[in-house]
Image: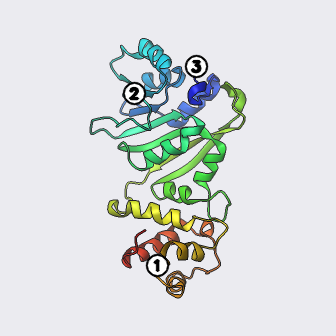
Amino acid sequence: MGARYGQHFLRSAKKLHWIISRVEPSGGDDIIEVGCGRGEMTSYLVKEAGTVLGVEIEPVLFASLNERFGSLENVRLVNADFLKWQGPNDDKTYRLVGNLPFYAATAIIDQVVGDKVAWSDAHFLIQREVALRICSPPGRRQRGWFSLWVQSKADATILGDISPKAFWPRPRVNSSLLRLERFEEPMIAMEDREGWRRFLHACFAQKRKTLLNNLCSAFGEKFTKEQLKGMIGNLAIDELVRAEALELGLMLDLFNGFVREGAWL
């Protein structure tokens, strides 16, 4: 049970207390727990939060959760894959919590950042390598399109690490607690969001290539290389720089320049 979906259950009460102390649920919170597992974290959330909406993919675990928590007035449980789930049909703004399966963590965070549900913040226990990639600053090798995609929507912070021995079955790698705090004012307009995502993919298409060469590959039919040199030169960007070296603000300025030129992938 759990192996089919890549689940590693957190069995350390000390670490559960630590996570809850970082989440700090209160009576006014509406929380979505992504992957309730055996209900260890759920048992804390239902006592502290206003409402808890639990989404669990595994049928046997769901049945156990339903027997344990289903009668509580502030709890609603859904037997579904979060990635395929349509989301809650209400106008609430949720806080999200979850010990995410490693194989699905990036996809789940992608959907959250894409506003699958209305949300204010998220606390996810994920593979440390993925957390480092999401929070990666300019100049780090881990920095990629997904780093900037998440960082343009939320403040991303690693709150701490948890070793494999705190889980059953034991994973082979360390985990990190990632906090995402959604920006009230979006950096990218709703109508430009998909263009921003495609632009980031283009900039990081081949990480060993320079930013200029990746842009030439993506936009070569619309702009000459000299025109693209001018666009990045106007922002004082070295034509030999790689995308991973750019700060988010500079990448946004570059994207907005492409938007003004009507360049869409």
Residue at the far top: name it: 67
* Disc 1, SS: loop
Give the spatial CA distance, label 3 vs label 1: 52 Å
> Which of these two is toward me, 265 or 106?
265
The answer to whether the residues at label 2 and label 1 have Cβ atoms under 8 Å apart is no
Please name the colour scheme applied to the rendered image. rainbow
Question: Tag 3: residue type?
Answer: Met
Which quarter of the rendering shows the C terminus?
Answer: bottom left
Nearest to viewer (mark 2 / mark 3): 3
Q: Which of marks 2 and 3 is nearer the N terminus?
A: 3
Instruction: Establish if 41 lies above or below 190.
Output: above
> Residue 102 in the image: x percent, y percent?
60, 37
Could you tell whether 27 is left or right of 109 in the image?
A: left
Q: Say which residue label 3 marks.
A: 1
Could you tell whether 153 is left or right of 172 in the image?
A: left
Give the spatial CA distance, label 2 vs label 1: 51 Å
The answer to whether the residues at label 2 and label 3 have Cβ atoms under 8 Å apart is no
Could you tell whether 30 is left or right of 100 in the image?
A: left
Give the spatial CA distance, label 2 vs label 3: 23 Å
Q: Say which residue label 1 marks.
A: 221
- Residue 25 image-quadrant placement: top left
Nearest to viewer (mark 2 / mark 1): 1
Which quarter of the rendering shows the N terminus?
Answer: top right
Q: Say which residue label 2 marks.
A: 52
Instruction: Establish if 130 lies above or below 141.
Output: above
- Residue 28 image-quadrant placement: top left
**Which residue is rendered at x = 68% and y = 60% of the image?**
141
**Which residue is rendered at x = 54% and y = 55% of the image?**
146
**Which residue is rendered at x = 61% and y = 80% of the image?**
238
